[in-house]
Image (spheres, rainbow, N blue to C red):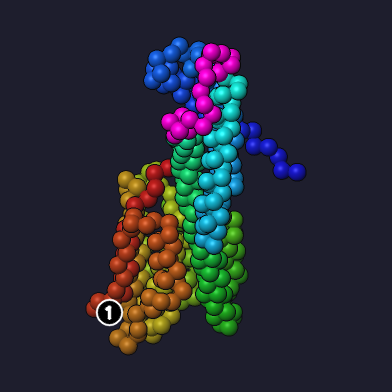
Amino acid sequence: MERLDWTRIAYHICFWLVYLFLNSWLGSIYNGIELERAFYSEAAVLPVKILLTYFVFYRIIPLYLDRDKVWKLVGLSLVAFAVGIVLYRSVTEFVLFPITNPGRAVPFFNWPGLYLVAFDLFITVAAATTIKMIRVHYKSLEFEQELLREKLQSELNFLRAQTNPHFLFNTLNNLYVLARKKSDRTADAIMMLSKIMRFVLYDCRAPRIPVADEARIIQDYIELEKLRYNDRLRVQYEENIVPPGGTIAPLLLLPFVENSFKHGATSTTGAANITVRLHVENNLLDFEVRNTVEGDERPPNPDGIGLKNVKRQLDLIYPGGYDLSVGREDGIFRAHLILKLEVD
């Protein structure tokens, strides 16, 4: 059995009480009678108005959504108002007048009186229906916004789920190379990978993390990559995070660093230079990654998983709050991100 929504019932009771007192006050002014008498008059016919209003709410309005039942809607509306008018006149003629004005005799089918009754019923139903439709409209907007938020969150979760295996795949390739070389650094690399994966699995569950934590994982990744290469790789890392530093979506910057190693070290045979610069001040993040590329080396594919993924995450998390430029010039590939961080 469906539980009663007492909050909703309370709202409806409040509406009818306000309507009763307001209409009584206006009736006393318009008809030039005492407020008490106007209150009794309005209270007597209020049940008819309530019955008609809720009949319109729950029997007629639902037909509006079905275009095949237009004539049924029109016919049922006319019948409902006709019955409401008869009930209204009956209460007035046989209940109200004998109590408040015993000497008054008004014909039951008095056309001016019927017009006033019909107008009174119509105004009441129209006012209540307008409030209901406004409430339904805003509730529908809230529902649509909630669906949109859920859709965007699902897409964001999917993008992050893509990022983790992509990152793990690239890192395992590094371990594979060290293992093939039977390098003494393999154990250290596995330990570093374990530390990084702990961060990915646990710390990245939060929607935001301190920028300092993101910077720390970038440094750990750089150290892990250095184990794979000899002296031909030179990495310059610059960091300046002015307290408090702010927060950022996790693993948002790391894909840029991954791409720099993939295209600046793995895909080149000569000396490779990579520069990573991170500056945060006044909730503004300035992040730049540069790497050398050989003449025939194609620049990173903007449609690849890494850059495409991070671009979409930026669109979802920081719409209109970032500026990203990616390009190659004079043998240098450069990714530059300026991001307005959220205030904690």
- Residue 294: image location, x then y, percent: 32, 84
Residue 218 vertical placement versus 15 (above, below):
below
Q: What residue is shown at x 46% (from left), y 50% (from top)?
A: 141
Residue to which mark 1 is pinned: 331
Residue 338 vertical placement versus 49 (above, below):
below
- Residue 204: image location, x then y, percent: 54, 56
**Amino acid at dot 1:** Gly
Res. 289 in view: yes
Q: Is residue 111 left or right of residue 189?
A: left
Residue numbers of the magenta segment: 97-117
Which image quarter holds the N terminus? top right
- Residue 234: image location, x then y, percent: 37, 72
In the image, farthest residue toward the left: 330
Q: Is residue 267 left or right of residue 79?
A: left
Helix, strand or loop at disc 1? loop
- Residue 102: image location, x then y, percent: 56, 13
Q: What residue is shown at x 35% (from left), y 85% (from top)?
A: 297
Which image quarter holds the C terminus? top left
Q: What residue is shown at x 50% (from left), y 14% (from top)?
A: 37
Does residue 21 show up magenta in the picture?
A: no
Does residue 100 show up magenta in the picture?
A: yes
Residue 229 vertical placement versus 339 (above, below):
below
In the image, farthest residue toward the bottom: 296
- Within 10 Å of disc 1 (Cα), the crowding (few <14, some 14-19, many 20+) is some
Residue 90 picture quarter: top right
Res. 157 in view: no
Q: What residue is shown at x 59% (from left), y 56% (from top)?
A: 202
Residue 233 picture quarter: bottom left
Which residue is nearer to you in this view: 259 or 72?
72
